[in-house]
Amino acid sequence: MKLLNKVTLITGAGKGIGAATAKKFAEEGSKVVLVDINREDLDRVADEIFEMGQDVLKVIVDVTKRSEVLNLFKEASEHFGNVDIVINNAGIVQDAQILKMTEDQWDNVIDVNLKGVFNVAQAAAILMKEQGSGVILNASSIVGTYGNFGQTNYAAAKWGVNGMTKTWAKELGKHGIRVNAVAPGFISTEMTENLPEKVQEMMKSKSPLNAMGTVEDVANGYAFLASDEAKFITGTILSIDGGLVI
Ligand code: NAP
């Protein structure tokens, strides 16, 4: 097991990549703190992990609210004693082309995908500095390097996540804290499974592997970057995109 007896806090753990990552980390021996804005989703994932025999704490938090994030870290460290790994996964999309994007669409995506990542990482860094070690992993996207039609707000946020990842790697290395990000491409989720067959085929065909990624592919990337196998890796953005953009 790669992550035996570690404590991992994952935001947006109620579904999609976050839920798959929580299960992967539990399989690898990590205790998990599941964080989400949605109670029903969180309960379902927590039950699955509990049935696997792993220690799990669930906390309802909106990552855009600084006071809730500070309380989260207090609760997690009181419950488990420490937090070794933090995965900043919570994210949303509210797409529109620049000519039509509303101020709310801009603010909402920047709030969750950029400020939320800052809120959680800052609270994590304060705790990890005291511990003298830690790993922070951020959810970026290929859109954070290449942009995407209809995603001004999302591209700005993910570009920011890449910048923050490299900045924090430089600032926090001296405290024994590694900081990295993953940049998924087209990943098969509830949302993409409901797209027309033709659109799914088009997405697949863009990868030299002629496939969509799975949530487990992303979870595996996080597990590697969190583990000691990656102990000399910091400040990197790991593409998990089937070669989509080479
Ligand atoms: P998802 O299925 O929509 O899951 C995101 C989770 O985060 C949901 O449970 C959501 O709750 C929760 N959340 C939303 N706002 C929150 C907030 N303010 N505070 C706490 N939790 C909140 O997303 P996903 O597709 O797995 O993506 C996960 C991450 O990977 C995101 O950062 C995304 O940008 C990135 N990513 C995904 C893909 C992809 O193809 N799926 C590709 C590249 C990057 P609600 O459902 O109630 O809103």
Image (spheres, grey):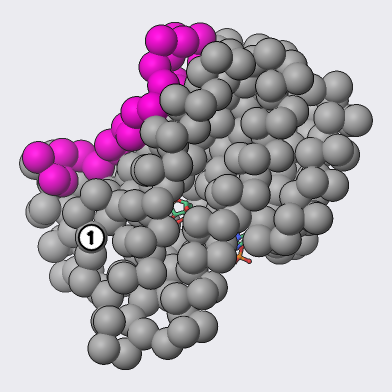
Q: Residue 27: tell me if it is visible.
A: no
Using the image as rendered, state which of residue 57 and residue 160 is in the foreground.
160
Q: Is 3 on the left-hand or right-hand side of 214?
A: right
Using the image as rendered, state which of residue 13 and residue 69 is in the foreground.
69
Q: Is 12 on the left-hand or right-hand side of 164?
A: right
What's the magenta region? 221-246
Instruction: Give the amino acid type for the residue marked by disc 1 in the picture.
Output: Gly
Q: Residue at x 80, y 55 (%)?
A: 67
Q: Is residue 83 above or below residue 227?
A: below
Q: Is 159 on the left-hand or right-hand side of 205?
A: right
Q: Residue at x 28, y 55 (%)?
A: 143
Residue 44 place in picture, x, y as percent: 72, 52
Q: Residue at x 69, y 24 (%)?
A: 128
Residue 62 place in picture, x, y as percent: 71, 60
Residue 202 place in picture, x, y as percent: 13, 62
Q: Is residue 164 above or below residue 52?
A: below
Q: Residue at x 32, y 32 (%)?
A: 238
Badge 1 is on which residue?
147
Across the whole image, how many numbered discs are drawn on residues?
1
Q: Quadrant of the C terminus?
A: top left
Residue 102's image quarter?
bottom left
